[in-house]
Amino acid sequence: MFDHMQSADTEILTVERAFLGGILLDRGQTLPPLLPQEFFSDRHAQLWERILDLADGVTAPELAQALADHDQLDAVGGGAYLAQCIEEGWMVIPALVPRYAALIRDACRRRLLKALGRDLAAQGFNETEVGRRLAEVPGRLQAVEPWSASRTWAAYRQTLVTAPPVSTGLQILDAEISGFLPGELVVVGGRTSHGKTAFGVHLALHAARAGVPTLLLSLEETPALVTARAVAARTDIPYRRLASNPLLSDLERQQIDDALGELDDLPWSVLTVETLRALDEDTVCGAVATSQARMVIIDHLQKITTAGESRQYGVERVMNRLHAAALRDNRVVVVCAQLNRESEYEQRAPRLSDLRDSGAVEILARKVLLLYWPCRHDAARDRHQYQILVAKQATGGVGTVQVRFRAETGAFWEATP
């Protein structure tokens, strides 16, 4: 009997999490007429109370902020628990949200009727009191209108208006891949010291300058070093000169001050291990889930620690969670990833198979860009010559884009004939 009751409790908790996640996934969803007290879990009741305050169209970042404002975020499990709800809600397509709401209402009805039965047996209520208590039991919920192709298409077109493709900052690359589309998971692969971090900072800065709210999750550098990279790219002062803090000229100090002022005005933010305090998958995915950024750049994948003995399955789980985060919020998620060292030994351009844990990374990414700096293998090559290999594109072809790169400042620009 106890095992059956425990199983029923676990089931309704799962239903409630999936329902809440489904609400956060579909911004156009009309909120069902549930009350916070109808939820079995107190934590879910708090989440629903804040969702009701925010009304239709609530997003995970908005909910996280509202919870924080009411000092409830830690009590409900933080961003990691919101991410769990959203991931379980991925199975709840919009047409199923009313059905899940009905399950929550029915479970509440059963609990109230059982409580009424116990009270009747213990206290012997008269008919008037029984009728009053029965009237307090909420009625069953009815399903709403089904999925509509025309409404879905109209909503998608509206999304493209409010969240157009994000430029890479390189017109020749944009022409090849049509920029980064809302809902895309993009992988940028590169060998150690081949400009992978510099390219991630370049993408973040260009998106922010275009007015796109951007989050850079740097999992291997301090905030100071990320700032030095951004200043170097803006001022053309070598990164090492900034990072090592030598004597600077008056002109350089003025350039730095101007760059810092511009960076402070941009709609971007930087999170590092100092801020996150941990690099486990729940912390990183929770930070992505609760961010309000339209573009998130993670540098880099291999720094994220995963649970379980199999690293391959752990990476696949992380990629699935990041892919869900991109899809549910119509945002771009860019993941920088290391390449295996075999290609370095062979001194050649990288291939898809060179990606570490390539199975999970390659399959889930909508686009894969591989970075190649030829002079690292051939000292006679121009140090500014750089290649971006479009190794995978779900809606287009593959090919190689020639650009220019200055390693000293991390700057990328168009290659001219």
Image (cartoon, rainbow, N blue to C red):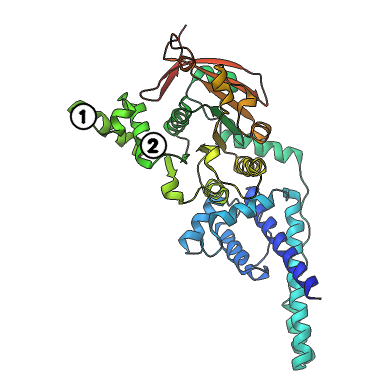
Considering depth in this image, is 383 or 211 the residue closer to the camera?
A: 383
Give, as a three-letter code, the residue at label 1: Leu
Q: Position of residue 396 (x, y in %)?
A: 66, 21
Q: Residue at x 56, y 46 (%)?
A: 305
Name, please, the residue furthest toward the left. 250
Q: From the viewer's perspective, is 226 left or right of 36?
A: left
Residue 14 in the image: above or below residue 272: below
Quadrant where the N terminus lies?
bottom right
- Counting every numbered tag in the picture gives 2
Give, as a three-letter code, the residue at label 2: Val
Q: Is residue 125 visible?
A: no
Q: From the viewer's perspective, is 260 left or right of 203?
A: left
In the structure shown, which secondary structural element does the residue marked by tag 2 occupy? helix
Q: Position of residue 345 (x, y in %)?
A: 55, 21
Considering depth in this image, is 79 or 214 the residue closer to the camera?
A: 79
Q: From the viewer's perspective, is 56 left or right of 258?
A: right
Q: Residue at x 69, y 59 (%)?
A: 32
Q: Is residue 378 visible?
A: yes
Name, please, the residue furthest toward the top. 417
Residue 393 in the image: above or below residue 282: above
Residue 14 in the image: above or below residue 173: below
Cα distance, mark 2 to mark 1? 19 Å
| Residue 248 circle label | 1
In the structure shown, which secondary structural element does the residue marked by tag 1 occupy? loop
Find disc 2 in the rendering and name its residue: 226
Q: Position of residue 415 (x, y in %)?
A: 46, 12
Q: Earlier in the sequence, mark 2 or mark 1?
A: 2
Tell me whether circle 2 and circle 1 mark residues in contact (CB < 8 Å).
no
Q: Residue at x 30, y 36 (%)?
A: 260
Considering depth in this image, is 262 or 403 the residue closer to the camera?
A: 403
